[in-house]
């Protein structure tokens, strides 16, 4: 099973991001995923790939 972490993709005209922007998003999503795992919220690999494919 995979840890469930929902991400929302938003389109933006912004084409440049700093490493700090990327790290903020990464650490935020990691924190959410750890919370999900600790609370037993998980999804199957198939569900995860379906979510990725939707983006």
Image (cartoon, rainbow, N blue to C red):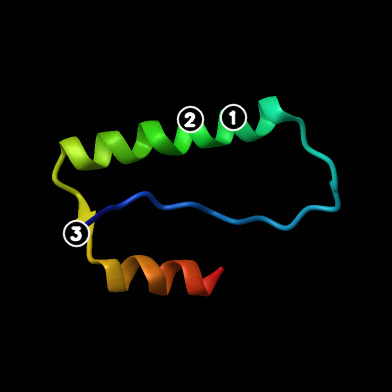
Which residue is denoted by mark 1 in the rendering?
23
Count of numbered circles in the view: 3
Q: Position of residue 24 (x, y in %)?
A: 58, 28
Taking the image as shown, residue 37 lies to the left or right of residue 5, namely left
Which residue is denoted by mark 3 in the rendering?
1
Give the image quarter of residue 22.
top right
- Residue drawn at (78%, 37%), measured in percent from left and top? 17
How far separated are the C-alphas under marks 2 and 3? 21 Å
Q: Where is residue 5 in the image (x, y as percent from the top left)?
A: 37, 49
Q: Is mark 2 on a helix, strand or loop?
A: helix
Local packing at callout 2 (Cα closer than 10 Å; few below 14, some 14-19, many 20+) is few
How far separated are the C-alphas under marks 2 and 1? 6 Å
Which of marks 1 and 3 precedes in the sequence?
Answer: 3
Which residue is denoted by mark 2 in the rendering?
27
Q: Please state, as top left, top right, bottom left or bottom right, where the C terminus lies in the image.
A: bottom right
How far separated are the C-alphas under marks 3 and 1? 25 Å
């Amino acid at each position: 099973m995979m840890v469930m972490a929902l991400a929302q993709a938003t389109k933006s005209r912004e084409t440049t991001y700093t490493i700090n922007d990327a790290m903020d998003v990464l650490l935020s999503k990691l924190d959410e995923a750890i919370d999900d795992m600790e609370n037993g919220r998980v999804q199957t690999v198939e569900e995860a790939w379906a979510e990725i494919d939707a983006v």
